[in-house]
Image (tube, rainbow, N blue to C red):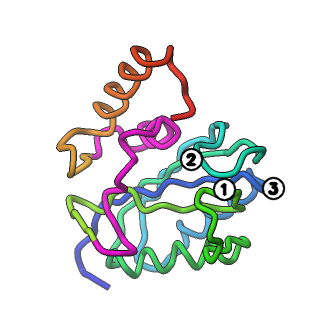
Amino acid sequence: MSSEWVRSAVALGSNLSERREHIAAAVREITNLDGVRNVRASRAIETEPVGGPTGQGDFLNAAVVFETRLAPRALLAELQRIEAKHGRDRSSAVRNAPRTLDLDLLIYGDHVIEEDDLIVPHPRMHERLFVLEPLAAVGADLIVPTCDRTVRECLADLRRKCELENGGDRSR
């Protein structure tokens, strides 16, 4: 564990079983991690699934912003442990399949990490309203290092783009 605190953000999603309970429990579990403090959680919003198999249920999506002394890989391991505890099976070969809990590390300070199984900032976060809207509620001033823009600015840009392209389709 580092002695330096790093401001980080995680997206939460669930579209199986007790969605609201999975999200609330994950927020509590992140809050209780050693090396995590000052957790702020957004409210959950309901969104349609993006990609993946047809016929799956709507998602609840939320975001948390916090400070951590955990290294990025250690934080990722904790997030995947929480997912597994809630029945998430990452061995599924189906991309964007329904899931009880999805925790994505979005931002880890000003770090840019590009490894096979860890990419931070999340590579598509600036293209997804279901990520940016809850994140802006609790971390609008966070900088997305690969865009060199705040979450607030990324959200405004994406809203304008959606309005121009498809009349504000929120499922992107």
> SS for tag 2?
strand
Tell me the amino acid under the disc marked 2: Ala
Outermost residue toward the left in this view: 148
Residue matched to label 2: 62
Q: What is the span of residues highlighted in magenta in the rendered image?
A: 115-142
Mark 1 residue type: Ile
The spot of residue 53 in percent (x, y) is 69, 51
Residue 102: x and y in percent read 59, 61
Judging by the rendered image, the residue that carries numbered circle 3 is: 18
- Residue 144's disc is none
Neighbour tally class for label 2: few under 14, some 14-19, many 20 plus, Cα within 10 Å: many
**Which one is nearer the viewer's eye here, 27 or 162?**
162
Q: Position of residue 168 (x, y in %)?
A: 50, 19
Kind of residue at badge 3: Glu
Counting residues from the start of the chain, the first of labels 1 and 2 encountered is: 1
Q: Are marks 2 and 3 in contact (CB under 8 Å)?
A: no
The crowding category of the residue bearing disc 1, from other C-alpha atoms within 10 Å (few below 14, some 14 to 19, many at least 20), is: many
Q: Quadrant of the N terminus?
A: bottom left
Q: Earlier in the sequence, mark 1 or mark 3?
A: 3
Residue 118 x/y as whole percent: 36, 71
Contact flag, marks 1 and 2 (Cβ < 8 Å)? yes
